[in-house]
Image (cartoon, rainbow, N blue to C red):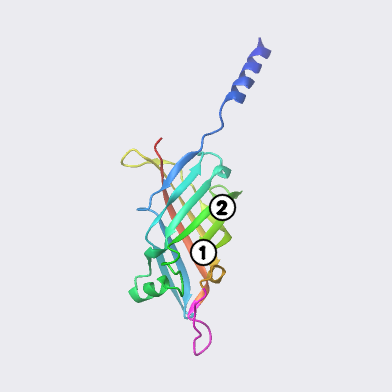
Amino acid sequence: MIRASVLALAAALLASPAAAQTTWQIDGTHSQATFAVTHMMVATVRGEFGKMSGTVQYDGKDLSSIVVDATIDATTISTREPKRDAHLKSADFFDVEKYPAITFKSKRVVPGTAGNFKLVGDLTMRGVTREVTLDVAGPTPPVKGRGGETRVGATATTTLNRKDFGVSWSAALDGGGVVVGDEVKVTIDLALVQKST
């Protein structure tokens, strides 16, 4: 009798489907991609991209199940200075007329401490694709939104060398140094909404 019960339980467990992947939509209204770069060797200029979209696949339990496919609208770049923004949109920098989108497609997850992990994937910018690693805090525990929808959040950071992506314009300063630094610190704050089935 006991043996039969154990066998029945084992069979039930083997027949149970693995945790299903859930699709989460990036909430562009409450998500943002920001960056910071050194200007003229002394100041930090910060900017953001106004539009972001995409999906995250996640079973809600196993971080290794996370798959991200995100797109940033490069045409929406803003540093709150119209002339600088126009220059950033030009062929000297992002060349948004030719390359209007920046994309990220994840490849694997590297586990970290509780509440943190690394997400490795391909970042494509200005037609150039490079593997990058994002340091991710999250996802947060799910909460119910005002409309009854389920929401989670996460924050990802990384530091890029803009020249790796062909964004190489700069100018030398009379006293030495350059107008624009090479390293760019990136922060992506994500609000995700569970897609209804």
Q: Which residues are the magenta region?
A: 168-180
In the rendered view, tell whether residue 106 sits above or below residue 170.
above
Q: Amino acid at mark 2?
A: Leu
Q: Nearer the viewer, residue 51 or 136?
A: 51
Give yes or no for residue 71 being in the magenta stretch: no
Q: Given this view, does label 2 or label 1 mark the residue nearer the observer?
A: 1
The x, y position of residue 98, in whole percent, is 44, 66
State the image quarter where residue 161 is shown.
Answer: bottom right
Instruction: Classify 73 as above or below 196.
Output: below
Quote the CA–CA distance across marks 2 and 1: 21 Å
Residue 172 is inside the magenta segment: yes
Can you give x and y, in whole percent of width and height, for residue 74 in the image?
A: 42, 63
Question: Which residue is under mark 1?
Answer: 127
Badge 2 element: strand
The disc placed on residue 102 is none
Residues packed near mark 1 inside 10 Å, few (<14), some (14 to 19) or many (20 plus) = some
Q: Quadrant of the N terminus?
A: top right
Callouts 2 and 1 close, C-beta under 8 Å:
no
- The quadrant the C terminus occupies is top left
Mark 1 falls on what kind of element? loop
Which residue is drawn at the image coordinates 56% and 32% (left, top)?
Answer: 18
Q: Residue furthest left?
A: 147
Mark 2 / mark 1, whichever is N-terminal: 2
The amino acid sitting under disc 1 is: Gly
The residue at which mark 2 appears reads as 119
Percent x, y for residue 141? 45, 42
| Residue in the image at 39% along x and 64% along y | 75
Kindly give the residue lying farthest to the bottom in the view shown: 174
What crowding class fits label 2: few (fewer than 14 Cα within 10 Å), some (14-19), or many (20 or more)? many
Q: How far across and how far down the image is residue 23, in percent?
A: 46, 41
